[in-house]
Image (cartoon, rainbow, N blue to C red):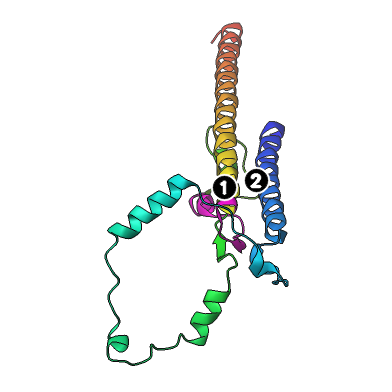
């Protein structure tokens, strides 16, 4: 019972620590300033852009020569002014920040659910009748933003979870096999003991 309790606590601790570390990394990333967070200063328009290499310039010129001409809008063809973008469109154009994203959590009780059957003691937190539903339960959704760096952190979290799950599952199976062997030996010893008692009793 003590071994099962310690292994269950280890699974809970890992999920909690992995979730916390990931959230801290995401929150720190969210605090980093982006280019859109800085206001323009006098003279920014005079900054010389980085020079383009000759190879890239030639590639762009060739692409422009092969590109078909853009169709003339009907409004412009009739001499009418093009429609002005809406306020919402102008806002989206000006807002160059990162889009929001809700990152899904990791399985909350999947590791703990490994301790059912195979003579494991009863779990005080999970009922066996609810185990299938509990396996699908995830940790809290992480509200943040979407970027390649955010995605890499979330992917790294999943990779860590899968590696730990693989090692943890192997350890649980090893302990379960040890308990099965020990129980088999105890049952065999009990049978031998009962047999000796019957022989001494003259049965």
Residue at 49% of width from left, 81% of height from top? 89
Residue 192 lies, with reference to residue 106, above or below; the image says above
Say whether disc 1 or disc 2 marks the residue closer to the N-terminus: 2
Residue 4: image location, x then y, percent = 66, 35
Residue 115 lies, with reference to residue 70, above or below; the image says above
Q: Is residue 107 visible?
A: no
Residue 161 lies, with reference to residue 198, above or below; the image says below
- Residue 105 falls in which quadrant of the image? bottom right
Neighbour tally class for label 2: few under 14, some 14-19, many 20 plus, Cα within 10 Å:
some
Residue at 69% of width from left, 31% of height from top? 3
Q: What kind of element bears circle 1?
A: helix
Residue 162: image location, x then y, percent = 54, 38
Residue on which the image places disc 2? 15
Q: How many marks?
A: 2
Residue at 53% of width from left, 11% of height from top? 203
Tell me the magenta residue range. Answer: 129-149
Per the rendering, the mark at residue 152 is 1
């Amino acid at each position: 019972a003590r071994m099962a309790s310690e292994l269950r606590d280890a699974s809970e601790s890992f999920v909690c620590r992995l979730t916390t570390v990931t959230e801290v990394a995401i929150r720190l990333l969210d605090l980093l300033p982006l280019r859109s967070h800085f206001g323009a200063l006098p003279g920014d328009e005079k900054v010389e852009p980085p020079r383009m290499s000759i190879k890239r310039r030639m590639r762009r010129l060739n692409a422009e020569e092969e590109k078909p001409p853009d169709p003339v809008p009907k409004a412009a063809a009739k001499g009418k002014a093009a429609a002005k973008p809406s306020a919402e469109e102008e806002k989206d154009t000006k807002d160059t920040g990162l889009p929001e994203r809700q990152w899904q959590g990791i399985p909350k009780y999947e590791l703990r659910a490994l301790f059912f059957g195979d003579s494991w003691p009863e779990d005080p937190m999970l009922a066996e009748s609810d185990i299938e539903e509990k396996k699908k339960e995830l940790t809290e959704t992480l509200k943040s933003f979407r970027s390649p760096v955010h995605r890499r952190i979330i992917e790294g979290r999943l990779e860590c979870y899968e590696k730990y799950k693989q090692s943890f599952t192997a350890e649980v199976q090893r302990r379960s096999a040890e308990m099965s062997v020990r129980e088999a030996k105890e049952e065999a010893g009990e049978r031998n003991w009962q047999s000796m008692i019957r022989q001494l009793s003259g049965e």
